Amino acid sequence: MTVFVLITTHRIAPGASAEVSALLGRYERRLRDEGPGLLVFQAHLGDHDDRLTLLHVFADAEAADVHLRFVAPLLFEASSLVRNARIEAYGKPGPALQEAIDRNAASGVTVLVQQPVAGFSRTGSSRAGSSRAGSSRAAR
């Protein structure tokens, strides 16, 4: 299974950090309770409360597209509080996310999209099984 990783960095409007924190709490609850295909979510605040970085790890690119539609109302609400500074996508984005990435790139947001070339995942049921069995056979 190849996961899809999306990392976004945002500049917080001056004086908006309390509002951003409240919105982020709602965003996290919504993702935790109903976020389809989202395996990991983390939010990181810069030292001066002026930058917010969000890390999302999805089961696949399709889950990232579903997520985008799922959180659209909260993203619209956030648009007056934060400005996109950087978008990093690790994996091939689906059509909805690619469209959003293209719009952001056209408006001057720094964008990085990279395709996987190697790796593994220890999420869910892929953690047990083949890698251990392969290791024990190799040790014999």
Image (cartoon, rainbow, N blue to C red):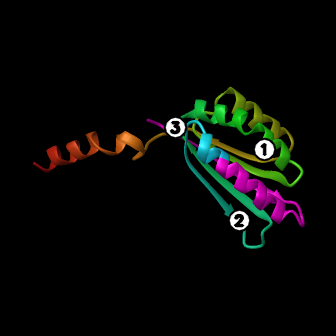
- Using residue 90 as the reference point, say whether residue 76 is left or right of it: right
* Residue 25 can be seen in this image: yes
Of the two numbered discs 2 and 1 on the same chain, state the one appearing first in sequence. 2
> Which residue corresponds to the image point at 75% horizontal and 38% vertical from the top-left?
101
Instruction: Please report the bounds of the magenta region as a residue range.
Output: 1-29
In the image, residue 110 lies in the stretch drawn in magenta: no
Observer-nearest of 77 and 101: 77
Q: Can you tell which mark lies on residue 45?
A: 2
Report the quarter where the N terminus lies.
Answer: top left
Name the amino acid type tagged 1: Leu
Residue 110 drawn above or below residue 34: below
Residue 120 seen: no
Inspect the image, locate mark 2, and give the three-letter code of the amino acid beneath it: Leu
Alpha-carbon distance for marks 3 and 2? 25 Å
Q: Position of residue 123 (x, y in %)?
A: 42, 45
Q: Quadrant of residue 61?
A: top right
Residue 28: x %, y % from top left = 66, 51
Q: Mark 3 vs mark 1: give the one in front.
A: 1
Mark number, residue 59: 3
Left or right: where does residue 136 sit relative to residue 112? Answer: left
Query: Residue at left 65%, top 31%?
Result: 66
Residue at 21% in and 47% down: 135
Which residue is identified by label 1? 74
Local secondary structure at mark 2: strand
Q: Nearer the viewer, residue 87 or 19?
A: 19
First in sequence: mark 3 vs mark 2: 2
